[in-house]
Image (spheres, rainbow, N blue to C red):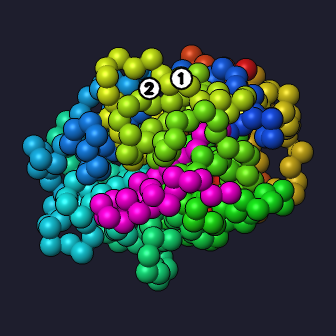
């Protein structure tokens, strides 16, 4: 169903050359998906990184800030192009590059309006893609000196981009599996990227509509373009679109299930940015409206204005943080695994649950060579890791977890010598 304000909104976008600046929906979990908001094992922050204009109400989305999700106030400025001239660096070689001479616009330039960013809490990096570009870029927030890193050896869009806006990337998020995800407007390309020293970008292909979506398709311009994505701790992504619709995306089978529509947002409020707050609810922003942010109750999809600190907030084309929605996976939902219960698996992790701070990784159908094993929080923060030099079938590697590790759910990732990745959730008691 097309909303009356959508036609006007798209007209404004083309006129101002702002194109899509994301319209995330916020609804998520509700009765359809039976998502329960549960305490996270690790505390979540109540801030988000935001792509904004130079001042409140401005539509030139090139400035990176951090904002408070509870009251809309400014926490800090990350990058203001008018006053900062950072070095641009090749992420692979470490060499300084001439971004102005590149055919890929750098975030912060006049051609670099951006509506897509994702925060990797494990690496403390903020990734983004310019609206008209084809290059993954990031800022390493661990470094005192501001630099913009460019992944120049791989294109984000590994396909021939069509004229128009269908292939613009306007939504990004990090999943609980540690990968970053980016989605084109038309939903025909869900792109996954790894992080670390060897970034690898993979086009997973087109999303499929869920069997109960009815007339609401994840590919329809008026209903499903633009917006933002967030993730839960069970491996799912959630797409919030300009029309206030929300889809639950399973990257494993590429299905997008329509969950419903947000209620009580003032017309013509467009949803462009979405982030999970410290309580597991969603805070949204419009890229065009600086009057307020709205918090969405995931059990009812009712939106309510936050208790803003100042008269105006920074209207944002995108939010990003390291929080996840708790999807209700309890300890009893994680299968108990003991040794010799995984003869059909190429890799297995045991025991599960972990009772004595010791995890074993069993290699069955092996890829010979060096494998990297990491244990991380669902936010992506690494808590333990080791290297395994796999040479024979049945080899087992032991990982000792920190003595003071917080009980809860974690993810074990194994990166094999052939760069294939295995991941599995575990519960630490």
The residue stretch that appears in magenta: 1-27
Residue that appears at 45% across and 17% down: 307
> Is the N terminus in the top left, top right, bottom left or bottom right quadrant?
bottom right
- Residue nearer the viewer, 263 or 406: 263
The secondary element bearing badge 1 is classed as loop
- Decide: is 7 above or below 278: below
- Residue nearer the viewer, 300 or 45: 300
Q: Which mark is residue 69?
A: 2
- Decide: is 212 above or below 403: below
Which residue does the numbered mark 1 point to in the structure image? 278
- Place residue 28 in its image quadrant: top right
- Residue nearer the viewer, 278 or 168: 168
Left or right: 84 as drawn, with respect to 390: left
Whether the magenta-drawn stretch holds residue 250 is answered as: no
Whether the magenta-drawn stretch holds residue 14 is answered as: yes
- Decide: is 303 above or below 396: above
The secondary element bearing badge 2 is classed as loop
Q: Residues within 10 Å of mark 1 (few under 14, many from 20)?
A: some
- Residue nearer the viewer, 423 or 126: 126
> Is the C terminus in the top left, top right, bottom left or bottom right quadrant?
top right
Q: Earlier in the sequence, mark 1 or mark 2?
A: 2
The Cα atoms of the two marked residues, 1 and 2, are separated by 9 Å
Q: Are marks 1 and 2 in contact (CB under 8 Å)?
A: yes
Residue that appears at 64% across and 35% down: 263
Q: Position of residue 409 (x, y in %)?
A: 68, 30
Left or right: 77 as drawn, with respect to 174: left
Residue that appears at 16% across and 61% down: 96
Left or right: 66 as drawn, with respect to 143: right
């Amino acid at each position: 169903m097309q909303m009356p304000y959508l036609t006007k909104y798209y007209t404004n976008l083309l006129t101002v050359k702002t194109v899509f600046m994301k319209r995330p929906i916020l609804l998520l979990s509700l009765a359809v998906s039976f998502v329960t908001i549960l305490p996270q094992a690790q505390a979540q922050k109540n801030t988000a990184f935001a792509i904004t204009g130079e001042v409140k109400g401005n539509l030139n989305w090139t400035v990176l800030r951090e904002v408070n999700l509870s009251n809309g106030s400014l926490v800090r400025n990350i990058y203001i192009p008018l006053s900062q001239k950072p070095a641009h660096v090749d992420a692979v070689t470490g060499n300084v590059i001439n971004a102005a001479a590149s055919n890929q616009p750098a975030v912060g330039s006049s051609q670099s309006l951006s509506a897509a960013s994702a925060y990797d809490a494990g690496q403390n990096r903020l990734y983004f893609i310019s609206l008209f570009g084809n290059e993954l870029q990031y800022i390493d927030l661990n470094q005192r000196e501001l630099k913009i890193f460019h992944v120049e050896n791989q294109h984000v869009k590994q396909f021939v981009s069509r004229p128009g806006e269908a292939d613009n990337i306007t939504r990004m998020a990090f999943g609980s599996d540690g990968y970053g995800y980016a989605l084109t407007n038309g939903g025909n390309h869900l792109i996954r990227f790894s992080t670390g020293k060897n970034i690898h970008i993979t086009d997973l292909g087109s999303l499929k509509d869920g069997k109960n979506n009815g007339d609401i398709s994840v590919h329809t311009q008026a209903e499903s373009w633009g917006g933002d994505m967030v993730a839960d701790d069970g491996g799912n992504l959630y797409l919030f679109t300009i029309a206030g619709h929300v889809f639950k995306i399973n990257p494993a089978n590429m299905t997008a299930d329509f969950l419903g529509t947000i209620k009580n947002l003032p017309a013509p409020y467009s949803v462009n940015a979405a982030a999970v707050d410290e309580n597991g609810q969603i805070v949204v922003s419009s890229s065009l409206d600086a009057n307020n942010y709205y918090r969405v109750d995931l059990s009812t999809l009712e939106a309510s204005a936050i208790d803003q600190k100042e008269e105006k907030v920074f209207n944002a084309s995108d939010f990003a943080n390291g929080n996840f929605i708790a999807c209700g996976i309890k300890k009893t939902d994680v299968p108990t695994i003991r040794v010799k219960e995984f003869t059909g698996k190429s890799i297995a992790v045991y025991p599960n649950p972990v009772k004595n701070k010791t995890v074993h990784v069993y290699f069955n159908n092996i890829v010979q060579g060096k494998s990297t094993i990491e244990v991380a929080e669902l936010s992506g923060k690494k808590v333990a890791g080791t290297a395994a030099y796999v040479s024979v079938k049945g080899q087992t590697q032991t990982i000792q977890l920190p003595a003071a590790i917080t009980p809860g759910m974690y993810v074990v990732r194994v990166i094999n010598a052939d760069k294939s990745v295995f991941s599995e959730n575990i519960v630490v008691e």
